[in-house]
Image (spheres, rainbow, N blue to C red):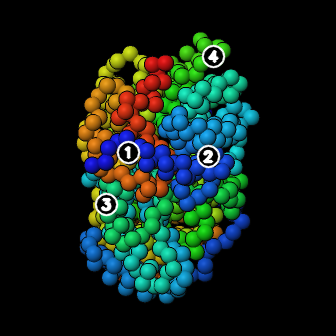
Amino acid sequence: MRNAQQLNHTCIQELIDRQLPSGGWPFTSDTTQSAVEPTALALLALPSESIRERDAAIRFLLHMQNANGSWPAFSGDDGGGSGLTGLALYALNRCCAQGMVTNRAVHWLMESRGWESHWLWKWKFRTSDRHVRFDPDKFGWPWMPETVSWVVPTAYSLLALKHARGISQQDLVHLRIRRGVEMLYDRICPEGGWNAGNGVVYGFPLAPHADATALALLSLLSEPPNDFITASLDWLERRAETCFALWSLAWIILALDAFGRPTALLTDRLSSVVDPAEVNDCATLAVVSLAFRRAAGDNAFRVAHET
Amino acid sequence: MTASLGVVAGASTTALLNLPKYHVTRRQPRSRVAILGAESYSHNLENILHSGFELFHLDLRGKTVLLKPNLVDYIPGNHINTHPLLVAAAVECFRRLGAKNVLVGEGPGHQRDTELVLLESGFSEELRHLKAHFVDLNRDELIMTPLLATYTGMKHLWLPRTVLEADFVVSMPKVKTHHWSGVTLSMKNIFGVVPGAKYGWPKNILHWKGIQESILDICATVPVHFVIADAIVAMEGNGPLNGHPRPLNRIVLADDPVAADATCARLMGLDPTRITHIRIGAQFLGNVSIERIDQVAEAVCAPANPFEVVPEFQHLRATGSAQRDS
């Protein structure tokens, strides 16, 4: 079996080969439309030796930042801001890009919130629309403005705010982080783990998703241990037993490792099923690379919380 | 007082929805629908589909065909997705008709890991066997596209290049009830072309703009040329994810999505004229009236017990007289 280090090297080479002249990455290698999610994940995956590629990626992300401090989803997108703002900021902060960029982005994240926090919708969800079980006082971040909170953008935003350095209004930021954390606990699935948003709809418990669960857990890494986190880690371990999809498996490895749970067998499985040249999706390739790099003791999400 | 205001507001909303807000007319004088018997999911589906296609005189030589199945998520034991054997049979049949390229594309609405859905639902194996190319519409290249109807009030959507460049779009829904939209058939299935990379998972903005309105705007903008509906094992109750399997042992083919959905609704024991997007769609996207539908192969036969729906959609269930008239 090929080892994790060799495979990571191949993943990185594939990523470098697919970097666009703009410095960004597209989702799929047969297009030339740069997107923020694959670019931010690739930036996190690139080793420090890849100076030129990292610099180009950082320049691309800085150039892409909207006037209001948010990030769009892709090149050409409108400027309202997307749920990937947290991920872009997190990746830039991990590469020590701070200052005005961070302050503007943090300001936008502080202003952005799921629509369930608006008094009108709060009233609606409390009175007439009761099919989805959640507490609208506990709100995270939406995928796009004027929609409700969802797990993945909330996890990305929490990672960014928890890791942001040198920002003003620390108390307010802390409060906003608390609302986001509460939202994740409120929306958890009955058996642990997270679906895209809510855990129960029309009285039916929804099944958790591996990637959403892993990302939520990574964003909760600095929280005190509790039953929600333990149940979700347990669910993730059970889900991992039958998971062969690269994106989910890689995220599972990153989350379990960050919480100190064993992942060697999962890394072996990832090694046995991945052929980097055949992975068309650049975001997936980057997360797989991050999972392999973790095998060398470098988890891009655990380190962040320890610094 | 509150109830009265609610009734007035509801009535005015319905009246607003009924106002024409489309800039395109796709409705043909007549539509053709075929109901084919199919006892189970097997490799015999290719023969069944091929004989069904012969009823439509399709000329697809040199064209790019995009098959859009309904792949929401994977939940073991739940019949929530279009069956991979039906999609595989469709790939083979369109190739036999001379299509230059037959693609399969979908942008799952809940599950971000499309590869996981494909792997665990058995699609990957079938597609690999057929050497058929799958496009993740959630992550495809996007093009800003003006909407050809304005029921949502949105002016444009970012849509996948693969969808916009296809010569022939085939909607392949799983016939299901849906707790937000009543049913999910060939028109609702087109929600899946709206990319998660822009609009998120799920495509929540469409819910806020109105599901019925969004269906109409998207179907006006992305023409559905043909429908292959999987009603071999349908779903009733709390769809799209947590309903119960309901075998109908049928495949519905149609050259008109409104006619296809109206027919599927009738097979489910629902009144299509009470389903908002079908009723409004009949103004410009296709035909709902049985007088305008050439029914071939098997006849429409409503079930003795209409499909179960969530309480908000009880009114969709056809009564005896409504069934005859709809």
Give neighbour class at mark 2: few <14, some 14-19, many 20+ (Cα, 10 Å): many
Give neighbour class at mark 1: few <14, some 14-19, many 20+ (Cα, 10 Å): few
Marks 3, 2: nearer the viewer: 2
| Residue B102 place in picture, x, y as percent | 47, 74
Seen from the viewer's position, the closer of residues A102 and A98 is: A98
Please state the chain letter of the residue tagged with numbered disc 1 in the rendered image.
Answer: A
Seen from the viewer's position, the closer of residues B72 and A35 is: A35
Residue type, mark 4 in image: Gly
Please state the chain letter of the residue tagged with numbered disc 2 in the rendered image.
Answer: A
The reply to whether the C-beta atoms of the residues labelled 2 and 1 are less than 8 Å apart is: no
Can you say whether B71 is above or below B311 in the image? below
Dot 1 falls on a residue whose secondary structure is: helix
| Residue A212 place in picture, x, y as percent | 42, 38
First along the sequence among labels 4 and 2: 2
First along the sequence among labels 2 and 1: 1
- The residue positioned 43% from the left and 87% from the top of the image is B54
Whole-angstrom CA distance, mark 4 to mark 2, is 27 Å
Dot 2 falls on a residue whose secondary structure is: loop
- From the image, tell me which residue sits under label 1: A6
- The residue positioned 38% from the left and 83% from the top of the image is B50
| Residue B204 place in picture, x, y as percent | 55, 44
